[in-house]
């Protein structure tokens, strides 16, 4: 059995999100022409099934490699990718087609990965939650996140990345896209990312308002921060915990102090998850800069 329940239990302070990502453990594959395709996903010609899994029998491998076009016979270096639907641009301004049904509001996307980056190729994850707008005849972006890394990891480690909510209400569709060799310094043969046990965490099926602190109720300053990051909740809310995360969702500090020291951390982008005494949470982004 896949260990998705273990991941969700780590976030037990918020309500569990009941809708699963289809085939998030990449255990189910079907023949599609000459390729094996993960059920519920589409993959590029250089991506594949692998038995080098975090748990279970299979995982997904996205790889930068050469590919011969069967029609023109041209040989090109192709980035690795896999997606549950087609995307044209990253959120919040992109349009997404396809995907899978998602009517709730997850707090985060989680999973396990390894990475071999050649030439600083970046592995990226792109998530978008959308809702069809019958007036504009297009999709509204409700929530999403884009993040990546080019740091080599030889053994599976967990990622957990909070989603940012741009709109109100619940989505009806979700799209997840994994790529390597499409961002940064280009694409280099041999760059590989392994992905397994992808799942939603937290959230609710009735809307983010019921389980989340409103962003207007959480004040985080200064931003950018150099030495101290101050956190203040308006009204009668009291802070239960403050969690500092890096851009791939790893927790690097956990405290209940409203004055978080950030002086020892490298410059860059970070996320702060604030939990109040009732269990409601808010995730905010800030920049550490000297």
Image (cartoon, rainbow, N blue to C red):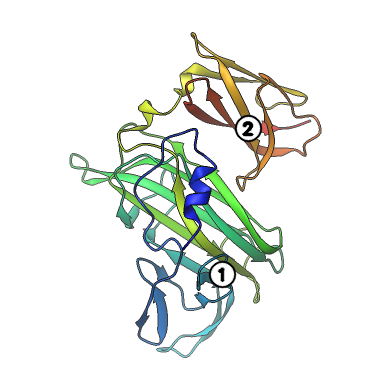
For residue 51, above or below residue 12: below
Q: Nearer the viewer, residue 287 or 94?
A: 287
User: Residue 87 placed where, x, y %?
Assistant: 39, 57
Whichever of callouts 1 and 2 sits on the residue coming sooner in the sequence is 1
Judging by the rendered image, the residue that carries numbered circle 1 is 53
Label 1 sits on a secondary structure element that is loop
Question: Horizontally, is 282 left or right of 140 in the view?
Answer: right
Kindly identify the residue that appears in the image at 57 percent across and 58 percent down.
112
For residue 269, above or below residue 199: above
Judging by the rendered image, the residue that carries numbered circle 2 is 243
User: Residue 68 placed where, x, y %?
Assistant: 50, 87
User: Residue 6 placed where, x, y %?
Assistant: 52, 50
Q: Residue furthest top?
A: 235
Q: CA distance from mark 1 to mark 2?
A: 29 Å
Q: Nearer the viewer, residue 56 or 111?
A: 56
Label 2 sits on a secondary structure element that is strand
């Amino acid at each position: 059995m896949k260990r998705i329940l273990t991941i969700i239990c780590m976030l037990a302070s918020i309500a569990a999100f009941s809708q699963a990502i289809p085939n998030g453990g990449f255990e189910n594959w079907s023949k599609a022409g000459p390729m094996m395709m993960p059920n519920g996903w589409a993959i590029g010609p250089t991506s594949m099934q692998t038995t080098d899994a975090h748990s279970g029998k299979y995982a997904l491998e996205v790889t930068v490699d050469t590919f011969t076009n069967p029609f023109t016979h041209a040989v090109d270096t192709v980035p690795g990718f896999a997606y549950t639907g087609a995307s044209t641009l990253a959120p919040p301004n992109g349009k997404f087609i396809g995907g899978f049904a998602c009517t709730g509001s997850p707090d985060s996307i989680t999973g396990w990965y390894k990475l071999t980056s050649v030439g600083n190729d970046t592995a990226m994850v792109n998530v978008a939650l959308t809702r069809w707008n019958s007036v504009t005849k297009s999709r509204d972006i409700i929530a999403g996140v884009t993040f990546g890394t080019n740091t080599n990891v030889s053994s599976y480690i967990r990622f957990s990345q909070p989603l940012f909510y741009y709109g109100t209400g619940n989505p009806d569709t979700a799209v997840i896209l994994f790529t390597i060799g499409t961002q940064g310094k280009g694409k280099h043969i041999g760059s590989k990312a392994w992905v397994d046990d992808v799942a939603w965490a937290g959230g609710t099926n009735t809307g983010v308002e019921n389980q989340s602190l409103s962003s207007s109720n959480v004040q985080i300053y200064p931003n950018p921060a150099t030495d101290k990051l101050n956190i203040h909740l308006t009204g009668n809310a009291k802070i239960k915990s403050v969690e500092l995360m890096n851009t791939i969702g790893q927790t690097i500090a956990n405290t209940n102090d409203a004055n978080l020291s950030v002086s020892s951390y490298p410059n860059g982008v970070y996320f702060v998850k604030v939990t109040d005494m009732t269990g409601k949470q808010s995730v905010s982004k800030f920049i550490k800069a000297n």
